[in-house]
Amino acid sequence: MKKINFICVSELKQRGWTDGLIKKFLPKPDETKTNPVIKCAAPMKLYQIKRVERIEKSEKFIKEMEAISIRKSAAKKAVETKTAKTVKWANSVNFNVPTFSKDELEHNAVYQYEQYNDTKVYDRDDEDFINRICTNYIRHECTTYDRVLNSLYGLVGRNKAYEIIKEKVNQEIKQKHKWLQ
């Protein structure tokens, strides 16, 4: 059985090393080797396993790892806090949905769909399709939905907020236009 004497950067990272730790504790590789998968890629940096293990046991390295763990925990808490704030905001958003007669809504939705997609709607008997474009018409053309979504740009937790907001506006649409359910 062949004994492994070297490990590469990806294996260091699997052991919990970060780029900063590698730069600080292993600034120069013990050896370099041509990448076996992509020949024209940068050479692989290899580190003696005994050297890595010795560093990992050092007090200085252990303290650095503990500090990283504390920073990761704080960052995770910050993300959770920011996500909760964004979700709370999304839950507070209300939509004013106008009420249409079924004929008026279908006419407006089909017209808007045809203009936007540069096509004709020939099968007006496809109830699922007509209901979908009616819902989309109200959501995008008759409410502040798109503006609200734009305000999520760059916020932590925007994916959860998006789901909440879309569900809220869809529920409001269905409440005012029962036939869309």
Image (cartoon, grey):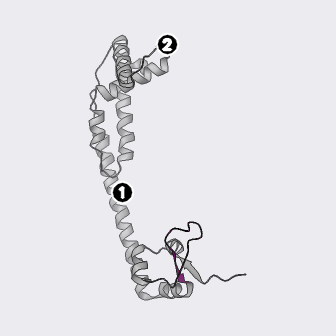
Residue 158 appears at what percent x and percent y? 35, 47
Residue depicted at x 36% and y 25%: 116
Label 1: few (<14), some or many (≥20) within 10 Å? some
Amino acid of disc 2: Asp
Residue 52 locus on image (x, y percent): 51, 84
Measured along the vertical axis of the image, is residue 84 above or below residue 110?
below
- Looking at the image, can residue 93 be seen? no
Q: Point out the residue furthest to the right here.
A: 1
Give the camera-side residue of 14 and 69.
Answer: 14
**Disc 1 element:** helix
Q: Tag 1 or tag 2, which sits nearer the N-term?
A: 1
Q: Give the secondary structure at mark 2.
A: loop
State the image quarter where residue 93 is shown. Answer: top left
The answer to if 121 sits in the magenta stretch is: no
Residue displayed at 30% across by 35% down = 146
In this view, 47 is above or below 177: below
Q: Position of residue 103 (x, y in %)?
A: 37, 11
- Quarter holding residue 74: bottom left
Distance between the alpha carbons at the discs numbered 2 and 1: 47 Å
Residue 66 seen in the current view: yes
Task: Label the magenta part by its dominant secondary structure.
Answer: loop
* Span of residues in magenta: 33-48
Q: Position of residue 87 (x, y in %)?
A: 33, 46
Mark 1 lies on residue:
80
2 vs 1, front mark: 2
Quadrant location, the C terminus: top left
Q: How many marks?
A: 2
Q: Is residue 32 left or right of residue 162?
A: right
Kind of residue at disc 1: Glu
Q: Is residue 41 magenta?
A: yes
In this picture, is 77 found above or below 173?
Answer: below
Query: Disc 2 designates what residue?
Result: 125
